[in-house]
Image (cartoon, rainbow, N blue to C red):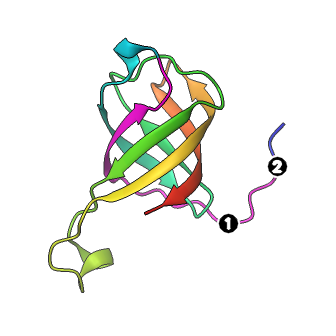
Amino acid sequence: MFTQRKFPRHDIEIPVSIKCKNAATHQRSWHIGVTKSISVEGVTIEADSLPEVEIYAIVEMLCFPKQGFLFSSIPEPEPVKLAGRVIWQDKNKKRIGLEILTTE
């Protein structure tokens, strides 16, 4: 059951690398993808090589923000490390939805 979102989503594409923390050995490698929408609470990620993941699996994610108008005051944005919980997966569109758990 999905609850109503408290925060707005924004259609922003940020390159990411993701991997499942507690997956079988063949699923532990990093997968390259891109965010499709993001909010304070969660993120939708699209990745061609993403294997099927279990709902509620914990995922590590590295975001690689680009220098641009959102980051004009940061000359070289550093990667941001996040952890999330898989809330849904659409195998046909090669997308997953994550609830953001922590930031570092």
Q: Is residue 20 magenta?
A: yes
Name the dominant secondary structure of the magenta segment.
loop
How many angstroms separate mark 1 from mark 2 (CA)? 12 Å
The numbered dot on residue 3 is: 2
Residue 94, given in percent of the width and then of the height, sits at 45, 25
Q: Kindly identify the amino acid type of the residue bearing the numbered disc 2.
A: Thr
Q: The C terminus is located in which quarter? A: bottom left
SS type, badge 2: loop
**Are there few (<14), some (14-19), or many (20+) residues within 10 Å of tag 2?**
few
Amino acid type, residue under disc 1 in the picture: Phe
Which residue is the site of mark 1?
7
Q: Residue at x 32, y 46 (%)?
A: 16
Give how far across and how far down residue 37 sits, in percent. 50, 52
Judge whether 15 appears above or below 40 on screen: above
Indicate whether residue 52 is drawn in magenta. Answer: no
> Magenta segment range?
3-23
State the quadrant of the N terminus: top right
Could you tell me residue 9's position as x and y percent? 58, 60
Q: Where, by quadrant of the figure, is residue 65 drawn? A: bottom left
